[in-house]
């Protein structure tokens, strides 16, 4: 029983990270109907920048704030300069462009920072809480991770459901031409969507960095888990992304704990396939299946 | 808390200008050598309801697209209230007091009926992302103001009870009403209706006719429609297009009697009413 509790707590913290990555994919999908394969590389880039800021300032929080700000700008710039040219075109173009961006960012990061993984400090203590004389695998830092992801989710739901700019962003995503006729600056909504998504992604990058270390390719695996979580959640729903992320984290923790850690990636892909076969629109999607 | 300036829309309605409506001069549009519109001219006075009719492919929707700036004409000029529309971008239309419904429906599929209308109410206003993120409480109030406007507009069209339904859950006729509410919520001065009666049954159509008639005098309406009954009963004037050319214009009764119109639009029959079959569903 202790083992089950340990694995559950362990899965919660991992799942929160997947949820944050999924959230960034969902925000971009909602805004522009594009799957951003470069998200992992963007997270890596902002994590490196955060590391530099922490080294320079000595403060984790300045590093985090720098990463979030750079993520926001990076997302906006990428949308404006690159993605704007392929929006509304064939989906394959978007796939090729975002994968190309992934390769480009990872190569540039390799040139600047080299290929050796660098350690990243956690925000809080990573020793587990002691509960009933036993140390559980859930630390103050894990609590911070879960709380930060929850805060981002609540903020994005509020933005979409409770503000007029969120409304315009949704309208622009569903029917850009109609939205334009109604006075919505569709291009700006797309830019805002990418900026917000990259902000969420850079948060995920900083949160996961202590666990995976920072190197040009170290965030690719996280992107696959985040993508799986996003698909489970239906790609279109921020709460779905979070539930999908937490669920995936738990299942993978059980798979790793009871089955063996070599099965974790396999497990994620098996879940992805199962969801796509049984409910291709995801478990949380209420909209009809959209042709992609 | 600084007072919010409701500038744009207030000044737009204050400057409603009795002398200038919509001026369309010598519009020519070619698509790959095909003539979509050839030297089409039309004046619509403020508050007038003008119908544009013609067989399929006559260029009716293209004319709307020219007015909206979706299609740039090779020749000719569109003026709205004395302002050339040559440089107008589609997103600026709402701010200029122009509203358009689309053929079919064009509702946002993932937004509820009320949210659809709220986008229409919101369109001509400016607010930054920053203020929405930094001032959620204020953005929240703005949201509830929009919702109030949207519910009023839905209420005017008798569909307030479907406010929280997704469009796909609504019958076609109700979706059409939601789309009309969305077009009217911003209180446009020029309303472009592209086949508003398409797919409607007889009851819904006569109600739509009354509604359009009710707008006359306040809103300038340009109406593209296949249903002659509707066009003839609500329009002050009618423009008939055939293969991109304007072949007649004038009062409905005169146009109906025009031999060129009978020839082109109604074929050899002299009864202007189209067959009722196919309209019975609704």
Image: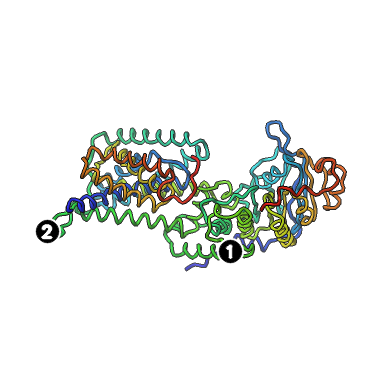
The chain letter under disc 1 is B
Judge from the rendering whether residue B157 lies leftward or rightward of residue B261; answer left or right: left
Judge from the rendering whether residue B256 lies leftward or rightward of residue B82; answer left or right: right
Q: Residues within 10 Å of mark 2 (few under 14, many from 20)?
A: few
Q: Residue at x 53, y 55 (%)?
A: B166
- What residue is shown with label 1? B160
Extreme-top residue of the structure: B33
Q: Of residues B7 and A243, which is closer to you in this image?
A: A243
**Vertical arrangement, residue B104 with respect to residue B149, above or below:** above
User: Can you give x and y, in whole percent of width and height, for residue B265 in the image?
Assistant: 80, 42
> Can residue A139 be seen?
yes
**Vertical arrangement, residue B281 with respect to residue A101, above or below:** below
Q: Which mark is residue A133?
A: 2
| Circle 1: element type | helix
Question: Is label 1 in contact with label 2 (beta carbons under 8 Å)?
Answer: no
Q: Of residues A268 and B136, which is closer to you in this image?
A: A268
Extreme-left residue of the structure: A133
Q: Of residues A262 and A80, which is closer to you in this image?
A: A262
The chain letter under disc 2 is A
């Amino acid at each position: 029983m202790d083992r089950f509790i340990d694995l559950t707590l362990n899965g919660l913290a991992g799942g929160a990270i997947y949820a944050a990555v999924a959230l960034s994919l969902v925000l971009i999908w909602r805004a522009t109907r594009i799957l951003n394969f470069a998200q992992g590389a963007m997270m890596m880039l902002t994590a490196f920048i955060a590391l530099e800021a922490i080294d320079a300032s000595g403060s984790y929080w300045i590093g985090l704030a720098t990463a979030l700000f750079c993520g926001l700008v990076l997302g906006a710039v990428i949308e404006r300069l690159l993605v704007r040219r392929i929006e509304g075109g064939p989906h394959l173009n978007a796939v090729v462009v975002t994968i190309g961006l992934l390769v480009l960012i990872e190569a540039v990061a390799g040139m600047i920072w080299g290929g050796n993984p660098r350690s990243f400090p956690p925000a809080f203590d990573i020793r587990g809480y002691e509960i009933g004389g036993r140390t559980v695998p859930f630390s103050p830092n894990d609590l911070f991770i879960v709380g930060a992801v929850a805060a981002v989710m609540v903020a994005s739901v509020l933005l979409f459901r409770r503000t007029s700019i969120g409304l315009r962003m949704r309208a622009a995503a569903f029917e850009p031409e109609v939205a334009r006729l109604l006075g919505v600056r569709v291009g700006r909504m797309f830019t805002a969507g990418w900026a917000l998504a990259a902000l969420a992604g850079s948060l995920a990058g900083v949160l996961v960095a202590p666990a995976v270390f920072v190197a040009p390719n170290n965030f690719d695996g996280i992107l696959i888990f985040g993508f799986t979580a996003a698909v489970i959640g239906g790609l279109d729903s921020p709460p779905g992304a979070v539930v999908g992320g937490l669920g995936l984290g738990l299942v993978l923790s059980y798979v790793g704990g009871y089955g063996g850690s070599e099965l974790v990636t396999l497990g994620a892909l098996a879940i992805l396939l199962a969801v796509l076969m049984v409910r291709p629109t995801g478990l949380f999607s209420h909209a009809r299946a959209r042709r992609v | 808390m600084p007072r919010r300036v409701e500038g744009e829309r207030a000044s737009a309605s204050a400057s409603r200008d009795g002398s200038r409506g919509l001026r369309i001069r010598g519009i020519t549009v070619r698509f790959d050598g095909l003539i979509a519109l050839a030297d089409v001219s039309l004046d619509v006075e403020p508050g007038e309801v003008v119908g544009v009719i013609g067989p399929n492919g006559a260029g009716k929707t293209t004319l709307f697209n020219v007015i909206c700036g979706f299609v740039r004409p090779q020749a000719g000029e569109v003026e709205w209230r004395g302002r050339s529309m040559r440089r107008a971008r589609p997103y600026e239309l709402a701010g200029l007091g122009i509203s358009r419904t689309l053929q079919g429906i064009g509702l946002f599929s993932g937004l509820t009926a009320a949210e659809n209308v709220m986008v229409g109410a919101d369109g001509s206003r400016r607010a930054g992302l920053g203020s929405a993120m930094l001032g959620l409480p204020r953005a929240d109030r703005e949201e509830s103001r929009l919702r109030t406007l949207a519910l009023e507009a839905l209420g005017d069209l008798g569909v307030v009870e479907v406010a929280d339904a997704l469009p796909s859950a609504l019958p076609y006729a109700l979706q059409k009403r939601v789309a009309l509410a969305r077009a009217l919520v911003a209180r446009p001065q020029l309303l472009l209706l592209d086949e508003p009666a398409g797919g409607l049954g007889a009851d819904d159509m006569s109600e739509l006719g009354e509604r359009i008639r009710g707008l006359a005098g306040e809103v300038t309406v340009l109406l593209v429609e296949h249903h002659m009954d509707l066009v003839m009963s609500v329009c002050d004037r009618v423009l008939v297009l055939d293969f991109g050319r304007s072949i007649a214009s004038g009062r409905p009764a005169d146009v109906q009697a025009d031999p060129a119109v009978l020839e082109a639009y109604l074929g050899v029959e002299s009864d202007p009413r189209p067959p009722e079959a196919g309209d019975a569903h609704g």
